[in-house]
Image: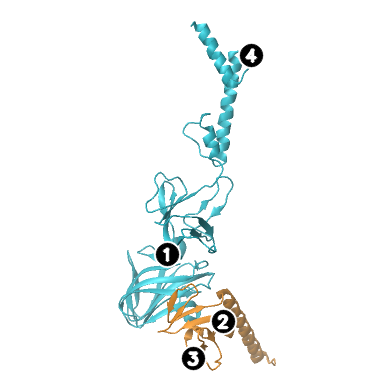
Chain colours: A cyan, B orange
């Protein structure tokens, strides 16, 4: 086949691909090709603006897949006892051995949850907030993960894949193993009398002495959506009492400002989990832990 | 302040003859509406919430929305302050009640 014949055959194929009828000059075909390339590029720009996923090669072959990626959710919920491989941003991994049959994001518990259903209680802030939609915005603020297992709603661990790593979900902690959760509590500060001391150690808060004192959050903490305030405390000196509660003021041991409290008088020398009902408190208050002629260690303070 | 608790550990300011008297500083200076929105579980007793969570005494927590109780207490304190100011005005200015 001569070169001319080959060129003619190629030109015919190009015309067929471009849908060009008749004999079009190479300049005109080049212009058509340029237009086609511009349109493909514009299509990928639109896909990106609408939250679609762009492929490695922005060619016409990959365009249908990219278009398919536009619609739908901007997150995925995956269950299992090990983290899913190759996660994408906003993949929510629920660490569970019970198959997830459905899931809910809501501020109140859904009715008639089936076995395996996962409920993510939502609040007005979250360490793992995300936009649920690729197009437009529905911002979701999950607080924790719970799952219906054999008729009981149980807490389960959840992590979200963010910025290339698995992020733990914040679960209501106010102090835990040295972490003061300052963005929520403003840190913890002590007010003491007559020799009582509080020491903020690397892994716990130590309290001791023969007087009285309180350690409290520097900021008011939102209690809405939570039902119980807890503290895990090991008492080493039984003394008089220890108290966990909420106050409307943060720098006083004055009972006038207490909103709720749970006291243990002459507690035994062991690890205690102190629980206070806060189900009817939907505002922000200071959290306090008081001791009177007692000594011991605060390991953790949290809300559920 | 002396209060009275019923069989559900709800607080009252008067005894209907079936209640248990409790003396506790938590309620000092609080109005009746505030006191009666609280639950007091004495030491050695326990209370089970509707979701099954068990709370050991001694615990003091509202069974009515706290915002409602706080509003009642603030109104009570405003009224007491107004009475005090009026009494002071009488003492200083000779006004009569």
Give the distance between the C-alpha atoms of the residues marked 3 and 2, in whole angstroms: 17 Å
Q: What element carries label 3?
A: strand
Q: Is mark 4 on a helix, strand or loop?
A: loop
Give the distance between the C-alpha atoms of the residues marked 1 and 2, in whole angstroms: 30 Å
Tags 1 and 3 both on a single chain? no
Tags 4 and 3 both on a single chain? no
Chain of the residue under label 4: A
Question: Residue A289: horizontal and vertical position, in percent?
Answer: 41, 74
* Mark earlier in primary sequence (4, 1): 4
Tags 4 and 1 both on a single chain? yes
Estimate how packed mark 1 is, as few (under 14), some (14 to 19) or many (20 or more) residues with alpha carbons within 10 Å: some
Quadrant of the rendered image containing residue B34:
bottom right
Residue at point 42%, 60% (across, down)? A156
Residue to which mark 2 is pinned: B34
Residue to which mark 3 is pinned: B21
> Is A130 drawn above or below residue B42 in the view shown?
above
> Is A20 drawn above or below residue A211 in the view shown?
above
Chain of the residue under label 2: B
Question: Residue B47: horizontal and vertical position, in percent?
Answer: 46, 80
Residue to which mark 4 is pinned: A22
Quadrant of the rendered image containing residue A244:
bottom left
Estimate how packed mark 2 is, as few (under 14), some (14 to 19) or many (20 or more) residues with alpha carbons within 10 Å: many
Give the distance between the C-alpha atoms of the residues marked 1 and 3, in whole angstroms: 37 Å
Q: Single out the mark in the foreground, 4 or 3.
A: 4
Q: Is residue A302 visible?
A: yes
Chain of the residue under label 3: B
């Amino acid at each position: 086949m001569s070169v001319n014949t080959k060129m003619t055959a190629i030109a015919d194929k190009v015309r067929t691909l471009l849908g060009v009828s008749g004999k079009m000059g190479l300049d005109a075909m080049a212009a058509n090709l340029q237009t086609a390339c511009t349109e493909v590029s514009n299509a990928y720009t639109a896909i990106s603006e609408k939250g679609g996923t762009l492929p490695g090669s922005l060619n016409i072959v990959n365009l249908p897949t990219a278009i398919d990626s536009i619609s739908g959710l901007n997150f995925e919920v995956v269950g299992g006892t090990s983290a899913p491989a190759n996660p994408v941003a906003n993949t929510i991994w629920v660490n569970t051995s019970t198959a997830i049959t459905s899931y809910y994001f809501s501020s109140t518990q859904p009715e008639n949850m089936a076995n395996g259903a996962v409920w993510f209680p939502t609040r007005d802030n979250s360490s793992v907030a995300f936009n649920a939609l690729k197009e437009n915005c529905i911002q979701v603020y999950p607080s924790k993960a719970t799952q219906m297992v054999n008729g009981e709603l149980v807490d389960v661990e959840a992590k979200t894949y963010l910025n290339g790593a698995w992020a733990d979900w914040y679960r209501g902690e106010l102090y835990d193993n040295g972490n003061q959760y300052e963005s929520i509590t403003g840190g913890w500060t002590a007010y003491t009398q007559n020799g009582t001391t509080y020491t903020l150690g690397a892994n716990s808060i130590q309290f001791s002495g023969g007087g009285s004192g309180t350690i409290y959050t520097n900021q008011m903490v939102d209690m809405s959506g939570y039902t119980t305030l807890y503290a895990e405390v090991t008492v080493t000196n039984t003394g008089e009492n220890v108290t966990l509660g909420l106050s409307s003021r943060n720098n006083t041991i004055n009972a006038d400002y207490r909103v709720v409290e749970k006291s243990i008088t002459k507690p035994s020398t062991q690890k205690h989990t102190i629980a206070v009902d806060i189900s009817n408190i939907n505002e922000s208050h200071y959290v306090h832990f008081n001791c009177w002629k007692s000594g011991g260690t605060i390991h953790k303070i949290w809300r559920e | 302040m002396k209060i009275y608790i019923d069989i559900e550990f709800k607080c009252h300011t008067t005894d209907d003859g079936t209640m248990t008297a409790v003396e506790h500083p938590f309620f000092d200076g609080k109005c009746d509406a505030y006191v009666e929105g609280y639950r007091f579980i004495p030491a050695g007793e326990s209370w089970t919430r509707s979701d099954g969570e068990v709370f050991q005494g001694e615990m003091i927590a509202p069974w009515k929305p706290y915002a409602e109780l706080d509003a009642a207490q603030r109104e009570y304190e405003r009224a007491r302050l107004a009475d005090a100011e009026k009494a002071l005005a009488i003492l200083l200015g000779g006004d009569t009640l």
